[in-house]
Image (cartoon, grey):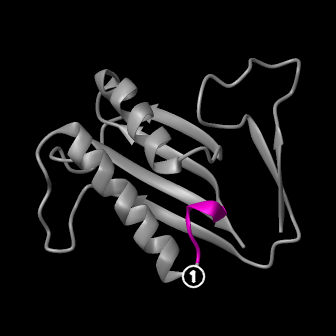
């Protein structure tokens, strides 16, 4: 599989940690990961945005691993934030978790299904 980053010269340069577009060639499988919430396997939800963000990413990674994939296979993700004030912490945690990987991404500020959740992350991976 070959992943090529595309950042059109006629569009803004990505700020940090993502690509404007990715072209994926030679893949055999696509995995669509439903929105992963900040809920642990035992049903608990941690306090605070950073803890919830890290847990949501661990849940994304768990789904990828269950399909025999990793963050290296991630080609796109969409993050929903309950409040715009979480944007910078979200970016910092995302950049730490992705460790130089730059998938396509969208961040949306929206009401999330459960008021206790401050973040939800959905993803697309290819292998």
Q: Secondary structure at mark 1?
A: loop
Magenta span: helix, strand or loop, mainly?
Answer: helix
Crowding at label 1, few (<14), some or many (≥20) Cα neighbours within 10 Å? few
What segment is highlighted magenta in the picture?
69-73
Residue 119 falls in which quadrant of the image? top left
In the rendered view, tell whether residue 66 sits above or below residue 117: below
In the rendered view, tell whether residue 59 sits above or below residue 120: below
Q: Is residue 78 visible?
A: yes
Give the percent coordinates (x, y) of residue 24.
Answer: 82, 59
Looking at the image, which residue is at 46% across and 34% down? 108
Q: Is residue 109 visible?
A: no
Q: Which residue is disc 1 drawn over?
A: 68
Give the percent coordinates (x, y) of residue 14.
Answer: 68, 25
Is residue 102 located in the magenta-colored stretch of the structure?
no
Q: Nearer the viewer, residue 120 or 95?
A: 95
Location of the C terminus (image quadrant): bottom right
Looking at the image, which residue is at 44% across and 32% down? 91
In the rendered view, tell whether residue 97 sits above or below residue 71: above
Give the percent coordinates (x, y) of residue 42.
Answer: 14, 74
Location of the N terminus (image quadrant): bottom right
Looking at the image, which residue is at 82% across and 31% down? 7
Left or right for 126, reference 59: right
Left or right for 74, reference 60: right
Left or right for 2, reference 95: right
Left or right for 89, reference 68: left
Looking at the image, which residue is at 55% across and 81% down? 67
Q: Total marks drawn?
A: 1
In the rendered view, tell whether residue 17 sits above or below residue 68: above
């Amino acid at each position: 599989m070959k992943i090529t980053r595309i950042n059109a010269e006629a569009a803004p340069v990505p700020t940090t940690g993502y690509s404007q577009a990715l072209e994926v060639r030679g893949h055999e499988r696509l995995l669509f990961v439903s929105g992963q919430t900040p809920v642990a396997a035992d049903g608990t939800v941690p306090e605070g945005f950073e803890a919830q963000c890290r847990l949501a990413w661990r849940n994304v990674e768990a789904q990828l691993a269950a399909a025999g994939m990793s963050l290296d296979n991630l080609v796109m993700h969409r993050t929903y934030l309950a409040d715009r004030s979480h944007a910078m912490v979200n970016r910092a945690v995302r950049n730490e978790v992705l460790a130089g990987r730059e998938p396509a991404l969208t961040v949306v500020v929206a009401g999330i299904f459960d008021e206790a959740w401050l973040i939800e992350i959905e993803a697309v991976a290819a292998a």
